[in-house]
Amino acid sequence: MVKVKAATVWFAGCSGCHMSFLDLDEWLFEFAKFVDVVYSPIADVKVYPEDVDVCLVEGAVSNDEQVEMAKRIRQRTKIVIAFGDCAVTSNVPAMRNPLGKPEVVLKRAYDSPEFLNHQIPSEPGILPVLTDKVRPLHEVIDVDLYLPGCPPPAKRIQTALGQLLAGGPVKLEGRELIKFG
Ligand code: SF4
C-alpha cells in the first residue's frame, strides 16, 4: 500500500493546534497505518520534501522566512490546509497589526530601558525579519481547506483527515465542525 505523505508546519502560532492533533490519541495509530509524516515539528526532518500529499499549516504568516516557506509548501504540496484560527484569520498574532510597524513591538519586547542590555536582536541571514503585517495563510498562498478553531478540536481534525484519507471531498458541517474560537 502506498502511504499518504503528510506534513505539518508551525508558523506564528502557540503550537496549540499541534497539541490538539496529538489529542487524537489512539486514533494516531490508525492514522499511521495510512500516512507517513514526512515533515513536522514532531519529526526531525530539515528540508520540506517534494510531492507532499497534504500539509497542515498552523499559525499566521509573520516573517520573511515563513513567507518563503509558505511558497515552498504550495509548490510541493497537493492539499494545503489552513490549520486553526491563526492560519485562517491570523487571529492572536495579528494583534500587532494595529500598532503599526513591527519595530513598535520589537522595541517594547527587547529595547525598553528597564531591561538589562536592552537592544533589538538582529542577525541578518539568521534571524527572520518580521513582515510589516501578520497575514492569514490564504493572503500569501492558495489554500485548499480551512480548519477553524483555536485550536480545532481533535474530533474536527479527525473528521477532516478521515474524509481526506477516504478520498475526499472534505465536508465540514454543523457547529461542532466549523466553529471559530
Ligand atoms: S489557532 Fe489558537 S491554538 Fe492554534 S496556534 Fe493559534 S492561538 Fe494557538
Image: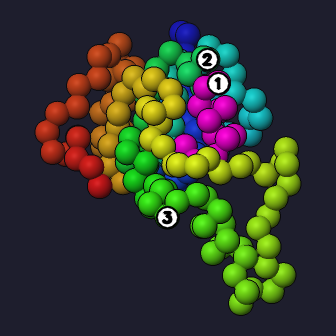
Q: Amino acid at mark 3?
A: Leu
Dot 2: within a 10 Å radius of its alpha carbon, few (fewer than 14), some, or many (20 or more) residues?
some
- How far apart marks 3 and 2 lie (CA) works out to 35 Å
Q: Amino acid at mark 2?
A: Arg
* Residue 48 appears in the figure: yes
Comparing labels 1 and 2, the label whose residue is closer to the camera = 1
Disc 3 under 8 Å from ligand 1? The reply is no
Label 3: which residue? 99
- Single out the residue that lies furthest toward the bottom: 114
The magenta region covers: 61-72
Comparing labels 1 and 3, the label whose residue is closer to the camera = 3
Q: Which mark is residue 76?
A: 2
Q: Nearer the viewer, residue 35 or 20?
A: 20
Q: Which mark is residue 123?
A: none
Question: Which residue is found at the position 52% from the left and 53% from the top?
Answer: 13
Magenta span: chief secondary structure: helix
Whole-percent x, y for residue 12 in the image:
55, 51
Label 1: which residue? 72
Q: Amino acid at mark 1?
A: Arg
Mark 1 lies on a secondary structure that is: helix
Q: Earlier in the sequence, mark 3 or mark 2?
A: 2
